[in-house]
């Protein structure tokens, strides 16, 4: 054996004292170990993702020898087995941790290691037992929800108090909250109010609260999900339930979210009690009691055995020698009627992390489902061949490699499916040409010509498909939007400038001429409208690499609401404009927002959206409101976000659009401060008494702008407006407050007092400064390596020489191989430049975004994001290859970079470039710009 490699894998959500102890004991038991790899899995638990686990292991790593490496993994156990399989000359120790006296751990170890040593003679399983002490990820997560002191016993004793606090700060912002007793009471009150007129009373048992937060749910059950279930139960089954005259048990099932609520229905002389006994998220929940379905299951199952067909198709692939083993997992999403009504709804996707094909079935012909299955099987083959590992995005327009992979799946999937149907003698008799839509036939011939040079043959094939389905190619086209490539250009809807998708860089939809954000709202789940509103429906790319998307998102902050606010604002804007364009003097609209069967999809919020607009001769008035979910008597009602506008006959639609965004973001902030949509850390006390005193002139009007709830809501709304209108934050705030100065609602002196309060709050909200800000006219894009981080000395530590020398001596491939071999640790451990902190402290309060070029390895992308998360939390990082940095140039955009070629390309695109040689020199150049 040439060397001894030890490997330890798991989810580590989060890493604990026990995990570190396993590593230390393995190293002590096997001093011959040359290299020790810890594989960290990608599966999320209670909000803790792979990113948080890697950050914590990075803290633990300082108490381990240099031979230990931390690596992200899709499937840790699979990676350990592959390590043994791919290194037959090395001895590979499969390290397993077990807790003393725990039979379940022993059973788990036996299941995970069965037959490994027989299959791979170079592998040896080594079990390291540690004291139990309740040491589990579950208990650590529960402790994190309480305090850092409660978490401390689950962390290694070696950690300093500051390091333990750092671990707590990594976990606490992301850990998912349990549903509290008060929240459950609020849901019960909400449901009671819904069913009251039907004479039905809703009750929850004590066990319901225990089970709603149970680990066995895997994905936590949320307040909006439960509210949505009761709303649909009332809408679909309320009246029939109100007429029952005998007691019985039933299970209410939400097939979309796999949530099951067993009820006891008790009939009394005065009312009917619906007692929710328990709740669980379980996909195939079996019950002998009646089922009350909140959404329909797949309709095809009545007539066609789809599983049998897919089994035949799978055998056909095996018979053809296709590399599909081990076979993927298969999951059906049945009853998703919302998705089925969406023209661009999902049809299927492949998750390489779990090797799972997911098929959406509702409203689809079984043959169409089988076609999607074939397509995703090609992605499974690509994954088994290791060709999905280099994908860094889910958007075919951003990655040429992904573009090629998707094109291959389209072509090979289509041909495989056709060969299979041919083998089943399912070739359809062609339709009569005069009986088909000429446009449909023309489209069909064009599609079929991609597979044959014979136009006559293409026409016959097209007619065969049109005999099967007269709208076959229209439907195929909609399918392609989910499973293929769309378009090659984007046009700015502000200045009409267009650019090739391939040149769009990481921030694909930002116009680099005028700076306008053209991100299509259809990236979110589209909405439907009960009055037949014309949806601009969209697609989410086909679902590849969900694990990569989660990692790449980086630090979540207030920007997470931006797309949702954009979506709501666009709906409101189009509704107002539609009312104006029809010539109506007044109009209203109303939508429901929630996680499932609502007009507008949101998995974060549940509320009603209402708007009223009055068309005037010249008056323009902007107003809005929010109700967290309580009426004047304090009773639970559906939360409400409202917009109330007066718009002149000849409106400035751009101004109206920005003001709608401001109001929506403002009122959304209010919804997060109280009630059923409350966000941990945002909850604020009741201020209704103070508001009443202001309305009665017992307090000055200026106090309204100092209310705790209003300060946050105003700042969030105005900042969102500033971002979307591309104006300095300071100017937007000034314009807003000056309205009330001119109306004599507040004085100039009161305005300054208000601004002082707002300035003291904006840092806590992670918003930029807004005083003396000529700088807000500029946006700074800062490079990382050679500007903030010391790449050269980091590389020298491993290579023994400077990077330029190493590349000159061994070539570019070997140059990157050395860095990539160290994995994520190479990038996470990057030191600051000697003057890097001086530089950062000078620019940090400006509008700054990091713009860095990754290496060829995915580990550099993850490592850079982890470095930012560790050292500059909350700062946006965009990763773009060096040649794509220029795509972010604009007249007011400053690039600070240590590569001359990047600066020259930036300037050629009209931007301001500063070639970084030292912090002092760059600061002097910024001062010359007035910064």
Image: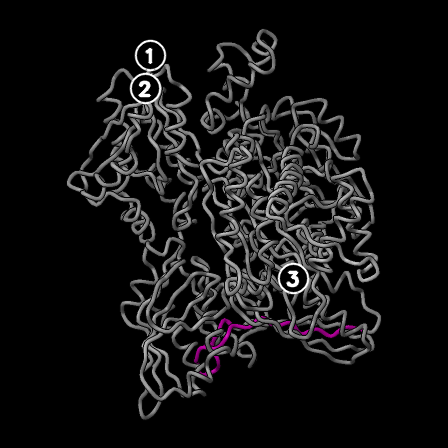
Question: At which x and y percent is residue 592?
Answer: 57, 71
Q: For residue 633: magenta?
A: yes
Q: Label 2: which residue?
A: 122
Q: Label 1: which residue?
A: 1
Give the residue drawn at x 49%, y 73%: 232
Q: Is residue 670 visible?
A: no
State which quadrant residue 647 falls in. bottom right
> Looking at the rendered structure, which numbered label has been put on residue 662?
3
Give the residue drawn at x 80%, y 60%: 436
Which sits earlier in the primary sequence, circle 2 or circle 1? Answer: 1
Disc 3 and disc 1 in contact, CB within 8 angstroms: no
**Magenta span:** 628-648
State how far apart marks 3 and 1 are (Cα).
66 Å
Q: For residue 98: magenta?
A: no
Give the residue drawn at x 63%, y 71%: 624
Mark 3: which secondary structure? Answer: helix
Give the residue drawn at x 67%, y 22%: 899
Is 35 situated above or below 586? above
């Amino acid at each position: 054996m040439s060397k001894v490699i030890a490997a330890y894998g798991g989810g580590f959500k989060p890493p604990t004292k026990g995990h570190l102890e396993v590593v230390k004991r393995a190293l002590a038991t096997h001093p011959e170990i040359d290299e020790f790899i810890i594989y960290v899995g990608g599966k999320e638990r209670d909000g803790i993702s792979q990113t948080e686990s890697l950050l914590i292991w990075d803290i633990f790593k300082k108490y381990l020898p240099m031979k230990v490496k931390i690596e992200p993994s899709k499937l840790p156990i699979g990676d350990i087995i592959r390590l043994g399989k791919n290194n037959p000359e090395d001895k590979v120790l499969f390290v397993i941790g077990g807790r003393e006296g725990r039979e379940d751990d022993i059973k788990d170890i036996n299941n995970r290691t069965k037959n490994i040593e027989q299959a791979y003679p170079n592998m040896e399983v080594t079990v390291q037992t540690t004291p139990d002490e309740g040491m589990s990820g579950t208990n650590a997560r529960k402790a994190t929800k309480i305090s850092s002191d409660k978490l401390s016993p689950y962390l290694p004793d070696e950690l300093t108090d500051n390091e333990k606090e750092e671990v707590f700060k990594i976990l606490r912002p992301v850990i998912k909250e349990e549903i509290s007793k008060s929240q459950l009471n609020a849901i019960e009150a909400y449901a009671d109010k819904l069913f009251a007129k039907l004479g039905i009373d809703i009750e929850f048992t004590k066990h319901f609260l225990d089970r709603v937060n149970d680990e066995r749910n895997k994905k936590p059950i949320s307040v909006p999900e439960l509210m949505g279930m009761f709303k649909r139960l009332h809408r679909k089954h309320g009246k029939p339930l109100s007429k029952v005259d005998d007691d019985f048990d039933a299970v209410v099932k939400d097939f979309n979210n796999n949530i099951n609520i067993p009820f006891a229905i008790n009939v009394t002389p005065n009312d009917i009690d619906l007692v929710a006994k328990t709740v669980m998220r379980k996909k195939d929940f079996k019950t002998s009691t009646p089922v009350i379905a909140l959404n329909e299951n797949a309709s095809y199952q009545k007539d066609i055995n789809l599983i049998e067909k897919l089994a035949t198709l799978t055998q056909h692939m095996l018979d053809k020698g296709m590399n599909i083993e081990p076979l993927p997992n298969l999951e059906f999403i049945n009853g998703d009627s919302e998705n089925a009504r969406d023209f661009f709804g999902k049809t299927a996707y492949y998750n390489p992390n779990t090797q799972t094909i997911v098929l959406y079935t509702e409203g689809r012909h079984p043959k169409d489902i089988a076609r999607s299955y074939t397509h995703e099987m090609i992605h499974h083959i690509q994954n088994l061949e290791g060709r999905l590992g280099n994908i860094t995005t889910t958007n075919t327009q951003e990655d040429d490699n992904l573009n090629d992979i998707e094109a291959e799946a389209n072509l090979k999937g289509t041909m495989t499916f056709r060969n299979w149907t041919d083998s089943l003698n399912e070739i359809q008799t062609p339709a009569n040409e005069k009986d088909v839509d000429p446009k449909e036939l023309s489209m069909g011939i064009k599609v079929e010509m991609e597979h044959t040079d014979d136009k006559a043959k293409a026409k016959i094939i097209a007619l065969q498909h049109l005999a099967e389905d007269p709208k076959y190619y229209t439907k195929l086209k909609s399918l392609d939007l989910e499973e293929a490539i769309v378009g090659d250009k984007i046009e700015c809807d502000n200045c009409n400038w267009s650019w090739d998708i391939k040149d769009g860089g990481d921030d694909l939809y930002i116009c680099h001429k005028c700076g306008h954000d053209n991100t299509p709202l259809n990236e979110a789940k589209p909405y439907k409208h009960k009055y037949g509103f014309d949806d601009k429906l969209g697609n989410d790319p086909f679902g590849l690499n969900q694990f990569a998307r989660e990692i790449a998102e980086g630090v979540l902050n207030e920007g997470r609401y931006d797309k949702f606010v954009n979506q709501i604002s666009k709906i409101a804007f189009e509704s107002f404009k539609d009312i104006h364009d029809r010539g109506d003097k007044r109009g209203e609209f109303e939508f429901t927002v929630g996680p499932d069967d609502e007009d507008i999809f949101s998995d974060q919020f549940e509320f009603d959206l209402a708007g009223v607009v009055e068309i005037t001769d010249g008056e323009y008035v902007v107003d809005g409101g929010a109700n967290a979910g309580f009426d004047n008597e304090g009773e639970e009602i559906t939360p409400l976000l409202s917009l109330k506008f007066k718009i002149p006959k000849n409106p400035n639609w751009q101004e109206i659009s920005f003001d709608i965004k401001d109001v929506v973001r403002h009122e959304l902030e209010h919804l997060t401060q109280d009630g059923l949509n409350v966000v941990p850390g945002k909850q604020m006390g009741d201020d209704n008494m103070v508001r009443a005193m202001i309305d009665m002139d017992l307090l000055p009007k200026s106090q309204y702008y100092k209310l705790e709830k209003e300060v946050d809501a105003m700042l969030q709304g105005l900042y969102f407006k500033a971002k979307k209108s591309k104006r300095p934050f300071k100017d937007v705030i000034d314009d807003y407050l000056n309205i009330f100065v001119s109306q004599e609602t507040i004085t100039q002196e009161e305005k300054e007092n208000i601004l002082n309060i707002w300035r003291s709050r904006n840092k806590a909200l992670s918003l930029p400064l807004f005083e003396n800000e000529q700088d807000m006219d500029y946006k700074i894009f800062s490079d990382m390596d050679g500007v903030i981080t010391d790449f050269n000395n980091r590389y020298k530590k491993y290579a023994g020489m400077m990077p330029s020398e190493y590349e000159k001596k061994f070539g570019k491939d070997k140059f990157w191989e050395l860095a990539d071999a160290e994995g994520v640790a190479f990038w996470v451990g990057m030191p600051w430049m000697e003057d890097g902190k001086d530089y950062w402290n000078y620019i940090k309060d400006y509008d700054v975004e990091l713009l860095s070029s990754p290496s060829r390895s995915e580990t550099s992308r993850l490592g850079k994001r982890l470095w930012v998360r560790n050292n500059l939390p909350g700062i946006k990082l965009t990763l773009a290859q060096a040649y794509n940095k220029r795509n972010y140039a604009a007249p007011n955009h400053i690039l600070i970079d240590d590569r001359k070629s990047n600066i020259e390309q930036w300037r050629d695109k009209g931007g301001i470039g500063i070639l970084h040689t030292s912090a002092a020199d760059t600061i002097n150049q910024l001062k010359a710009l007035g910064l």
